[in-house]
Amino acid sequence: LFPSQSTFHYNSGYWSNKTEYNLRGGETGFDAQETKLPTYWNTSFSKICLGMKIGQQINFTVINKQANSLYSLIADGQYRATSLGRTKWKTLIGSEASLQLNCNKEGFNTAGTYIRVRVGILGNNENDCITCDSIIGFGGSWGVTTGNVAKSGGDNGDKLIKAMGYILVQ
């Protein structure tokens, strides 16, 4: 489970260490308790289930990805692409989601010049990924830790939508 607060901001050491956070939060279900469990570094998987809760609505999507652990995909800061596509990323937010039309760089440790996200997608109004002004994801560096930010021509207007995020593996 990863939050809408700053504990798991892009630059947080929790992404690159093997330190647990609020173990009891992992027993409470889909609520607003932040937690990082040892499964982050010691559980291999073939699917990642991403969820975002806004208000009382939770939306989920699945990434088919095989790895030794989430830690192995994220901790070193190296970009690793995914191929969900912008439409699937937007379903995590719902009908209010907004992304600029260009760039669409997605994956783990996804970065432009000014914004980064540990798991997510970037959008830009220019035809590059340098000066992106929109993001949907988990562990963001710009505007929200988890959720959606869009400025300067997002396809559904300017947005600042904070979400409670859930990252589960199977």
Image (cartoon, rainbow, N blue to C red):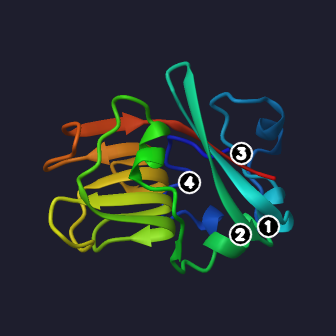
Please state the total of marks drawn on the protein image. 4
Q: Is residue 61 left or right of residue 125?
A: right
Q: Nearer the viewer, residue 94 or 7?
A: 94
Nearer the camera: disc 1 or disc 4: 1
Label 3–label 1 contact, CB within 8 A = no
State yes or no: discs 2 and 3 in contact (Cβ < 8 Å).
no
Dot 4 corresponds to which residue? 8
The picture quadrant where one finds residue 121 is: bottom left
Does 36 appear above or below 166? below
Label 3 crowding class (10 Å Cα cut-off): few <14, some 14-19, many 20+? some
For disc 3, the marked residue is 35
Structural distance between the alpha carbons of marks 1 and 4 = 16 Å
Hey, what amino acid is under mark 2? Tyr
Q: Is 143 left or right of 140, judged from the image as shown?
A: left
Which part of the image, by quadrant, shows the N terminus? top right
2 or 4: mark nearer the eye: 2
Could you classify mark 4 by the number of other residues whose Cα lies within 10 Å: few (under 14), some (14-19), or many (20 or more)? many
Secondary structure under the numbered disc 2 in the rendered image: helix
Q: Which residue is mark 1?
A: 41
Query: Mark 1–mark 2 contact, CB under 8 Å?
Result: yes
3D distance between C-alphas at marks 3 and 4 = 10 Å
Q: Earlier in the sequence, mark 2 or mark 4?
A: 4
Q: Residues within 10 Å of mark 2 (few under 14, many from 20)?
A: many
Say what secondary structure mark 4 lies in. loop
Disc 2 to disc 3, C-alpha distance: 15 Å
Q: Secondary structure at mark 3?
A: loop
Check disc 1 and report its element: helix, strand or loop. Answer: helix
User: Residue at label 2?
Assistant: 71
N-terminal-most mark, 1 or 2: 1
Residue 26 falls in which quadrant of the image?
A: top right
